[in-house]
């Protein structure tokens, strides 16, 4: 089963307010990201947020990988996970579907070169063990290190650079939103 994970647990220090709740075309960024995942084929969407009613980290203070770790604990071996950050509102359904299809064809984790998010991940015992070891034994919190440890493939099928808009500060926030 393909599940989606929205990483929405950041502190939003640079934005000055909770990014996940900021309005985007009549919905919050968090709702928008969840909707993209559903449209891309995810049967369930988890939201990593460390608040009541959301997926909470099992291993605290590990950034985005803490949310991925919690999601892997909530899923079964053989499932699949599509991970997106809450602050990339221009991601497209077609791009996300292509990322998943690429991962399914190779049965391997897939990310985009020079970008760490979004990514596709088959849920395996090895994946879960590797992430747990990175977080607990090596204290490694970087998404790129996790994807490197899994020998994630680089997806090259995207052509529209506008999908990479990342909103972290008020200056990043386009007037059109």
Image: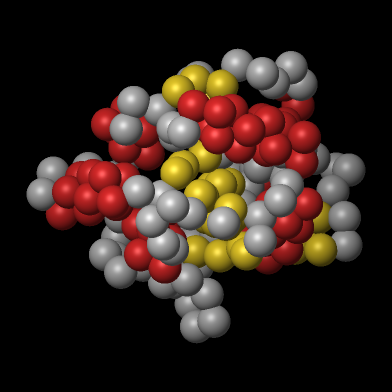
Residue 66 position (above or below residue 142): below
Count of picture labels: 0
Q: Position of residue 107 (x, y in %)?
A: 46, 33
The answer to which image quadrant residue 92 occupies is top right
- Residue 6, placed above or below residue 152: below
Question: As drawn, which residue projects farthest toward the left?
Answer: 137
The residue sitting at 87% across, 55% down in the picture is: 25
| Residue 33 visible in rendering | no
Does residue 50 show up?
Answer: yes
In the rendered image, residue 34, in percent from the top left (x then y), is placed at 69, 59
Residue drawn at the location 58% of the way across and 53% of the way down: 2
The residue lying furthest to the bottom in this view is 52
**Most foreground residue, 47 or 43:** 43
Position of 101 with respect to 145 (left or right) is right
Q: Which image quadrant for residue 43?
A: bottom right
Q: Position of residue 12 (x, y in %)?
A: 53, 56
Left or right? Give the position of 95 relative to 145. right
Q: Is residue 154 left or right of residue 164?
A: left
Image-quadrant location for residue 148:
top left
Q: Of 92 and 76, which appears nearest the observer?
A: 76
- Tell me the residue at 66%/18% (across/down): 157
Residue 57 in the image, given as x and y percentages of width and height? 36, 67
Q: Quadrant of the N terminus?
A: bottom right
Coloring scheme of the render?
A: secondary structure
Q: As drawn, is 40 to the left or to the right of 55?
A: right
Residue at the image point whose x is 68% and y is 38% from the top: 96
């Amino acid at each position: 089963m393909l599940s989606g994970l929205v990483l929405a647990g950041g502190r939003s220090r640079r934005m000055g307010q909770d990014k996940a709740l900021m309005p985007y075309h009549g919905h919050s960024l968090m709702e928008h990201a969840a909707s993209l995942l559903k449209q891309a084929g995810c049967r369930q969407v988890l939201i990593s947020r460390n608040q009541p009613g959301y997926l909470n980290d099992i291993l605290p203070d590990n950034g985005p990988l803490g949310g991925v770790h919690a999601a892997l604990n909530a899923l079964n071996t053989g499932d699949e996970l599509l991970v997106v950050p809450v602050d990339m509102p221009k991601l497209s359904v077609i791009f996300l579907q292509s990322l998943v299809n690429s991962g399914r064809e190779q049965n391997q984790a897939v990310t985009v070169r020079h970008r760490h998010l979004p990514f596709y991940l088959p849920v395996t015992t090895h994946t879960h063990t590797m992430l747990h070891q990175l977080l607990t034994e090596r204290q490694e919190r970087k998404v790129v290190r996790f994807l490197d440890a899994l020998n994630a493939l680089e997806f090259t099928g995207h052509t529209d650079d506008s999908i990479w808009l990342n909103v972290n500060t008020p200056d990043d926030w386009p007037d059109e939103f």
